[in-house]
C-alpha cells in the first residue's frame, strides 16, 4: 500500500512537469493576427480546432447596445427613474420602484423585455407592476394591465424609429448590417 502511494505521487509529479514542455509556444504577435475570428479560422484550416453550428446570417450575432435603436430609445425614455437591472445580453431593463410626488404609498416598476433587435411592435414587451403599501408597511404587488404599458411601447418604437432615421440622415455611409443591401 505504501509503495502504491509513492508510485502515485511520482506519476503525478512526472505528468505535471511534462505539461509545460512544448505545449505553450512563444509567438511573435507581429506574425499572428489579433483578430479572434481570423485566428479561429486559421486554426480550423490547420486542423487544430472545429466550429459547432453554422456561421452566417442570424447565428448568434448580437449588436452592441449603442447600435441598437430599441435599446437606446428605452434607456432614453426611462431616464427619469433609477434602473435596478440593465442586461443587454439578456435583453431586459428593469426600473427600481418609483412613485409620483402625489402618490400615497403606491410605487411602480417597469420591465422591458427585448424579443428582437428589429424595430417592430412584437419586438418588445412592457410589463408594469404596482406596489401598494399600508401604513404598517404591509405591501402587495400586482401586475398592472393598463394603457400605460402600450403607451410606453409606442413611445419606445417612435423614439427608436427617430434614432434610426437620424443616423441615416447624419451618416450617408451608414449601413445596417441586419439588412442585405
Image (spheres, rainbow, N blue to C red):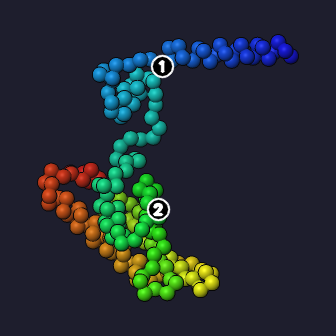
In this rendering, the answer to whether 64 lies above or below 127 is above
Q: Which residue is drawn at 67% across and 15% down?
A: 13
x, y percentage for residue 47? 44, 23
Q: Does the rendering let one see residue 44?
A: yes
x, y percentage for residue 137? 61, 81
Q: Which residue is drawn at 73% across and 16% down?
A: 9
In this rendering, the answer to whether 34 lies above or below 59 is above
Q: Is residue 17 left or right of residue 29?
A: right
Q: Does dot 1 land on a helix, a strand or a loop? A: loop
* Position of the N terminus by quadrant: top right
The circle drawn on residue 54 is: none
Q: Residue at x 29, y 22 (%)?
A: 30
Residue farthest to the right? Answer: 1
Residue at the spot of label 2 = 85
Mark 2 crowd level (few <14, some 14–19, many ≥20, 10 Å Cα): few
Q: Is residue 133 left or right of residue 53?
A: right
x, y percentage for residue 119? 31, 64
Q: Is residue 44 left or right of residue 172?
A: right
103, 23: nearer the viewer = 103
Q: Please tell me how many numbered marks the rendered image carries.
A: 2
x, y percentage for residue 52? 47, 38
Residue at the spot of label 1 = 24
Q: Does dot 2 land on a helix, a strand or a loop? A: strand
| Marks 2,1: beta carbons within 8 A | no
Mark 1 crowd level (few <14, some 14–19, many ≥20, 10 Å Cα): few
**CA separation, marks 2 and 1?**
41 Å
Q: Does the rendering let one see residue 127?
A: no
Q: Is residue 180 left or right of residue 173?
A: right
Amino acid at each position: 500500500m505504501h509503495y502504491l502511494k509513492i508510485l502515485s505521487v511520482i506519476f503525478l509529479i512526472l505528468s505535471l512537469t511534462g505539461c509545460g514542455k512544448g505545449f505553450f509556444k512563444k509567438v511573435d504577435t507581429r506574425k499572428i493576427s489579433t483578430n479572434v475570428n481570423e485566428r479561429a479560422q486559421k486554426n480550423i484550416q490547420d486542423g487544430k480546432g472545429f466550429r459547432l453550428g453554422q456561421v452566417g446570417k442570424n447565428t448568434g450575432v448580437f449588436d452592441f447596445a449603442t447600435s441598437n435603436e430599441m435599446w437606446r430609445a428605452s434607456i432614453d425614455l426611462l431616464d427619469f427613474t433609477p434602473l435596478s437591472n440593465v442586461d443587454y445580453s439578456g435583453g431586459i431593463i428593469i426600473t427600481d420602484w418609483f412613485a409620483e410626488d402625489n402618490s400615497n404609498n403606491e410605487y411602480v416598476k417597469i420591465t422591458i423585455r427585448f424579443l428582437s433587435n428589429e424595430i417592430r411592435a412584437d419586438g418588445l414587451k412592457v410589463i408594469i407592476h404596482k406596489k401598494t403599501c399600508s401604513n404598517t408597511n404591509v405591501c402587495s404587488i400586482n401586475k398592472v394591465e393598463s394603457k400605460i404599458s402600450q403607451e410606453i411601447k409606442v413611445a419606445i418604437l417612435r423614439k427608436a424609429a427617430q434614432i434610426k432615421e437620424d443616423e441615416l440622415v447624419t451618416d450617408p455611409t451608414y449601413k445596417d448590417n441586419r439588412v442585405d443591401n
